[in-house]
Image (spheres, grey):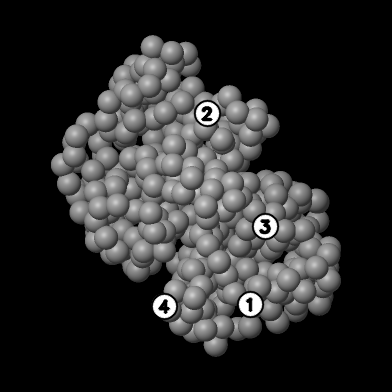
Amino acid sequence: MKALCWNGVNDLRVEHVPDPKILNQTDAVIKVSLSSVCGSDLHLIDGYVPTMRAGDIIGHEFAGEVVETGREVERFKKGDRVIVISIIGCGECWFCHNDLWSMCDNSNPHRPLADAAYGHGGAGIFGYSHAFGGYAGSHAEYVRVPFVDHGAFAIPEGLSDEQALFVSDAFPTGYMAADMCDIRRGDVVAVWGCGGVGQMAIRSAYLLGAERVIAIDSVPERLRMAEDKGKAEVINFKETSVHDELMARTGGRGPDHCIDAVGMEADETGVEYWYDRAKQAARLETDRPYVLREAIQACRKGGTVSVIGVYGGFIDKFPMGALMNKGLILRTGQQHGQRYAQRLFRHIVEGDIDPTYMMTHVLPLDEGVRGYEIFKKKADGCVRSVFRC
């Protein structure tokens, strides 16, 4: 089959690789119909996740059709249309039973790598390095799905694969970012980053009761999408001081909740950005936490900072004093998509949201390298490149 493979920093290639097979009787093989890029993939491509190996298939957000199941699979049969949550959960451990799917104890066969980095490793993730299980990703014609009864969800009748696709990752990630804020009616929410996850965080904040959402980015097309589709107020961080603007728009109090939907490769224009870039280049710091610092400084006293953008290692100049003295709540995590999938399908079926507007560039898998180039450069208004496999 054809697949998009990582072969080194900024080196992607469409290659012919062996078809996946059933390895365990709880597996299924899915014929991929649509597979989307994700901002966190760029951390792999740019070399910030050190446990990639040449030939690894990337991609973790996908929809498709079941073509084969193991004998112990109960919920699915050949021909079912499904989305698959990017996070792999066994469904049997304490964490899965408590709806903390991204912390699964059993789905990552390479947990010692993650244990060494984080103290306790989490779940496996499709196409996301060997520290997260070494699973083949979804930018391929077929993909093996372990524990399919606990990770796949049937696409409701009447919904297209396009409408359902982002329930695999971007929608539950953005929804969890807003859900971690414990939003109350009348709250003001600020969202840093207007890529796919940021767009879904904006919409989710309103679904959960926010009165106002303020979106921060510098890409005009993404800000326009946040404004037109998300009904957010927008701030271009290259044109004004984000902190000063947020204070002005909230009467000096600051947003009730701040969402970091950017993560380890934050862009900025000031001296802190170049400080972080220099430390990254010298391997003295792994992540650029400019957005996280700014969110902590801007959030109102007693508010919540929700971090859904991916961080991989260590950061410098963390404003612990501001976090503590302002009494902020800091909540983080990889998304628990299994917790949210059915709820998000209901929102789509009931017409609250149609996430297909994020599919700005639909390409054949053969053009996977170009799809990532457009996405990485934010060229031609790209929010998400999606591959038809």
Query: Could you give the CA–CA distance between mark 1 and mark 2, rounded to whole angstroms?
Result: 37 Å
Mark 2, residue position: 90
Return the residue nearer the eye: 108 or 161. 108
Specify which label sits upstream in the sequence, 4 or 3.
Answer: 4
- Circle 4 sits in a helix, a strand or a loop, which is it? helix
Kindly tell me whether residue 295 is visible in this rendering: yes
220 above or below 363? below
- Check the picture and name the quadrant holding the N terminus: top left
Residue type highlighted by circle 1: Lys
Q: Which residue is mark 1?
A: 317
| Residue that badge 4 annotates | 281
Q: Residue at x 63, y 77 (%)?
A: 317
Element assignment for label 1: loop
Circle 3 is placed at which residue position? Answer: 306
Examine the rendering and report whether any part of residue 384 can be seen: no
Disc 2 marks a residue whose amino acid type is: Cys
Give whichever of 165, 112 is nearer the camera. Answer: 112
Q: Amino acid at mark 3?
A: Ser
3 vs 2, front mark = 2
SS state under label 2:
loop
Asked whether the residues under the numbered discs 2 and 4 touch, taking CB atoms below 8 Å apart as contact, a structural biologist would say no
Amino acid carrying label 4: it is Ala
